[in-house]
Amino acid sequence: MRFHDLSNKELIDLSTGTRLGVLGQTDLEIDEKTGQILSFTVPQYRMFGFKKSEVYSRINWKQIKKIGDDMIIVETD
């Protein structure tokens, strides 16, 4: 799967059902030696899409439970 295929998928928390963001709006942490994705850094937003100041959530690759056609289901702590 290419990053382009993942880029517009919504991140949904399995425990709460809340929308965490869109993968295209995130930063990736990649292992330089292996090229594997380690985590996503998702910015937190307020109402109307305005970004909160420097508040981010980190989602480890191991927290991803399912990648579907429109969304990615993650299990947060």
Image: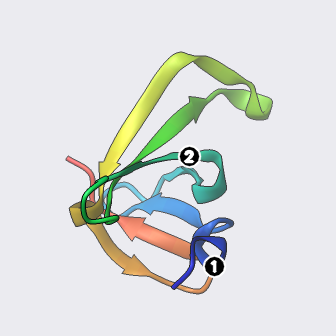
In the image, residue 69 lies at what x, y percent? 60, 86
Rendered residue at 61%/19% (across/down): 52
| Total labels drawn | 2
Which is more N-terminal, label 2 or label 1? 1
Residue situated in front as seen by the camera: 21 or 26: 26
Residue assigned mark 1: 5
In the image, residue 29 lies at what x, y percent? 38, 47
Residue assigned mark 2: 26
Q: Which residue lies furthest to the front in this view?
A: 33
In the image, residue 48 lies at what x, y percent? 80, 32
Rendered residue at 48%/21% (across/down): 55
Mark 1: which secondary structure? helix
Kind of residue at badge 2: Thr
Q: Find residue 49 and name its label.
A: none
Residue situated in front as seen by the camera: 45 or 41: 41
Label 1, label 2: how far apart the Cα atoms are? 14 Å
Relative to residue 34, is residue 30 depicted above or below? Answer: above
Kind of residue at badge 1: Asp
In the image, residue 76 lies at what x, y percent? 27, 51
